Image (spheres, rainbow, N blue to C red):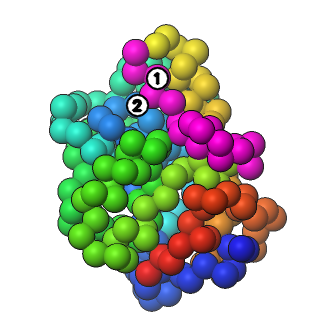
Amino acid sequence: MAATDHPVPPSAGGGEPLRICFVCLGNICRSPTAEAVMARLLEEQGLAERIEVDSAGTGGWHVGDPPDERATAEASRRGIPMRGRARQFHVGDFSFFDLVVAMDRRNLADLHDLALEPDHHDKVVLLRSFDPSATGAGDDLDVPDPYYGGPDGFSHVFDLVEAACRNLLDHVRVDLGEPSDGAPPDHPDHPDRARRR
């Protein structure tokens, strides 16, 4: 399905911005990376007032902590500011955000377990379902957790996240009636196969 077949979330059609929340396990590595990367893309494309981004974790172990210093260092190397403090995703976030973007299948399952309404369930997608290089086989749609590895893992995560965020933004631009040069990939888990309300 093409992105234009996917309905625009209600807040995107009114005066409110479209709101996206990126979610990983602890909200100190992958999801703040995705938030920072998407914020930079929105700034570059003049969409920061039309789309708002945030991030959260399914667990509460790191609540109040800054992003992992290795993620911050990689962001700085790329000229991307990374700010904020970790917070835990809660069920009320489903009502506030139009799209909830999970970093891996475990996060996806945890978010589905939290979703109390069918339309909340439909808001949850995998980030790498937007990555044209991902095949959708096995763990290929997961953004790997770099927490227990070295700096190279964080660099790899940035590369994966940037590729997927660019295509996610392409998808959202079409929903908002903005011109787009690309289209999201046709994965079985891609949100074009679901209903976002």
Query: Looking at the image, is mark 1 or mark 2 earlier in the sequence?
Result: 2
Residue 91 visible at all: yes
Quarter of the rendering containing residue 82:
top left
Please identify the quadrant where the N terminus is shown: bottom right
Q: Callout 2, which amino acid?
A: Cys
In this picture, is 168 found above or below 149? below
Name the element at disc 1.
Answer: loop
Q: Is residue 121 rendered to the left or right of residue 92?
A: right
Q: Give me the residue at 33% from left, 37% from top.
A: 25
Q: Position of residue 18 (x, y in %)?
A: 46, 72
Q: What residue would you read off at disc 2?
A: 29
Q: Is residue 137 magenta?
A: yes
Question: Residues in magenta?
Answer: 132-148
CB atoms at circles 1 and 2 under 8 Å apart?
yes
Q: Position of residue 57 (x, y in %)?
A: 30, 43
Q: Which mark is residue 146?
A: 1
Q: Callout 1, which amino acid?
A: Pro
Q: Position of residue 115 (x, y in %)?
A: 28, 65
Q: Give me the residue at 37% from left, 77% from top.
A: 119
Q: Is residue 149 magenta?
A: no
Q: Residues within 10 Å of mark 1 (few under 14, many from 20)?
A: some
